[in-house]
Image (cartoon, rainbow, N blue to C red):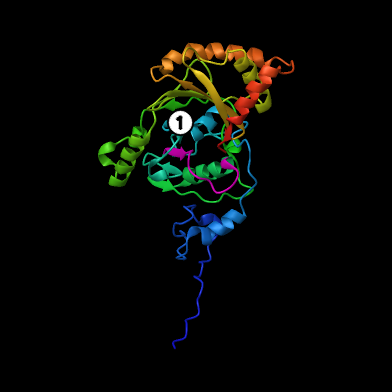
Amino acid sequence: MAKKRPQTKAKRPQLDDAEVPVVGAREPCPCGSGRRYKACHGRSAAQATTALVQRPFEGLPGECDWVALRELVPAATVGLTLRDGLPEGVPSVMLATVLPMAWPALRRDDGSVLLGLQNDTASGDISRDLADTLAQALSAPPGTPVQGRRAPADGPRLQDLLAPEGAFEPEVHAGFEFWVPDPDNATPEVTASLERANAAAIPTVRLRSVDAAYWCETPDKNHLRWVMPHEEERLLDALARLHAAGRSSLGEGTRLVGSFRAHGLTVPVWDLPSEVTAQDIEKPAAEFAERLAEALATDAPLTHDERRARGGLTNRQVTLS
């Protein structure tokens, strides 16, 4: 009877963990060991994951829009201003919801930088991971995509790299054509990625009358999802007051259906009839903002009906992050 060969474990190359890009758990580890990422460098990355930062974008201009672009908006861009100015040879830095091939960042041929926001990150601090990717992109050769990695625990965060003042004004796009300034010279892989992304994009519009509110169109009904900066318990009390009083809708046929949490902020959601456009909801949203401000200023205990309304809103609340 033949003897069984002793099993040997695949040798893991001696690489600095920070140099190994982050990939899917079941994909081959980029270090070349032949093992799946989760059983190789992914294991040490998981063990070193930092504690979850509940509000990773706190302190940045436009925190609510950062959350919206991370969780709600398919295609959008916004220019970023660096605290210490642009390095030589970098004409601009732009945040994008998604980049082709799901690249974490891209240094374009002209030296400009695109930073992807909706990628998976390796630690519990999205801000630190994004800052590390941005720093890599700023020094990458032009024409080079940047891979994600586990950021050093003492590395800078976005709050350290970005200017604290100034407006944060996202531009929402119908598709991802901003990926390819020169479509004729795009690679087949990028072209195919663009076609897939455009096919999956949900039509979305950022309202102008209020901050961080986004209308979107789906086959059966439309929605308004509004990222709000208020402390959660106080906001839920205010929404309950308005809901109990029949003042939480945005017009005929619309309904406040609940909310979800994302990156430490609360996002109320309204169902809208399919014929209600983003333009139709601008004025009702501005009027609701005034009613909400009044409700937020009220300190009186909730009534029985208001407590019941609050319970209904809380029961329909989910957490995305």
Q: Which amino acid type is marked by label 1?
A: Val
Numbered circles on residues, count = 1
- The residue lying toward the viewer, choosing from 248 and 167, is 248
Can residue 268 be seen from the camera position used here?
Answer: no
Vertical arrangement, residue 142 with respect to residue 269, above or below: below
Q: Main secondary structure of the magenta part?
A: loop
Vertical arrangement, residue 17 with respect to residue 105, above or below: below
The percent coordinates of residue 218 (x first, y second) are 40, 27
Q: Quadrant of the C terminus?
A: top right
Q: Is residue 152 left or right of residue 180?
A: right
Local crowd size for mark 1, using a 10 Å CA cut-off: few (<14), some (14–19), many (≥20):
many
Residue lying farthest to the left in this orientation: 184
Q: Quadrant of the N terminus?
A: bottom left
Residue at (40% x, 17% y) in the render: 277
Q: Secondary structure at mark 1?
A: loop
The percent coordinates of residue 32 (x first, y second) are 45, 63
Residue at (47% x, 64% y) in the render: 35
- The residue lying toward the viewer, choosing from 269 and 70, is 269
| Magenta region, residue range | 112-126
Q: Is residue 63 left or right of residue 100?
A: right
Vertical arrangement, residue 150 with respect to residue 68, above or below: below
Q: In terms of image quadrants, where is residue 129?
A: top right
Residue 117 counted in the magenta span: yes
Residue lying farthest to the bottom in this orientation: 1
Can residue 293 be seen from the camera position used here?
Answer: yes
The percent coordinates of residue 168 (x first, y second) are 52, 26
The percent coordinates of residue 205 (x first, y second) are 43, 23
- The residue lying toward the viewer, choosing from 221 and 231, is 221
Residue at (58% x, 47% y) in the render: 123
Q: Which residue is mark 1?
A: 73
Residue 264 counted in the magenta span: no
Residue at (47% x, 65% y) in the render: 33
